[in-house]
Image (tube, helix red, strand yellow):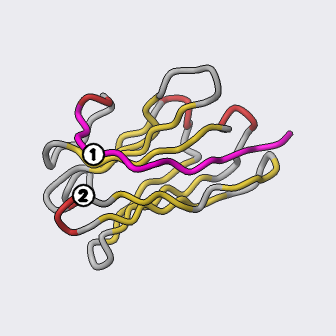
Amino acid sequence: VQLQASGGGLVQAGDSLKLSCATSRRTSSNNAMGWFRQAPGKDREFVAAIDWKGGNPLYAHSINGRFAISRDYATNTVYLQMNSLAPEDTAVYYCAAGRSSVSSKEATWYRYWGQGTLVTVSS
């Protein structure tokens, strides 16, 4: 099982970041992939998910069209493009591999989790 999230960092409000989640073919093959985040002192929350075929992207309401999830089958990588970042987006972002090809907003739907990458947005 391999899930390696990267791309986090310190940015200013309004900036963009692109997170990457490197997986193995075994981990991502036929599985939906998702991104979750956990802010300091808060519970982990759903951000975005994409099904095995790359369709049916799901997003949290709080994202409000600012983020986009995608996946590259050639490299077994899942991306989260984040635009118009705001201080409330500050969190550790985790990628996760689902239990099936169908995506979900529920954390329990995901079987494997990466170690997380920290995104800090200053005002």
Give whichever of discs 2 and 1 has the lower sequence position. 2
Q: Residue at x 53, y 61 (%)?
A: 6
Q: Secondary structure at mark 1?
A: strand
Q: Amino acid at mark 1?
A: Tyr
| Circles 2 and 1: CB atoms closer than 8 Å | yes
Which residue is label 1 attached to?
112
Q: Is residue 72 magenta?
A: no
Which residue is label 2 attached to?
1
Q: Is residue 114 magenta?
A: yes
Q: Residue at x 62, y 37 (%)?
A: 91
Q: Quadrant of the N terminus?
A: bottom left
Q: Residue at x 68, y 38 (%)?
A: 90
Q: Work out whether 78 lies above or below 13.
A: below
Which range is magenta?
A: 109-123
**What x and y, as percent, mark residue 14?**
77, 49
Q: Is residue 85 left or right of residue 6?
A: right
Dominant SS of magenta comes to strand
In whole angstroms, how far apart are the C-alphas of marks 2 and 1? 7 Å
**What x and y, as percent, mark residue 84?**
70, 48
Q: Residue at x 27, y 72 (%)?
A: 73
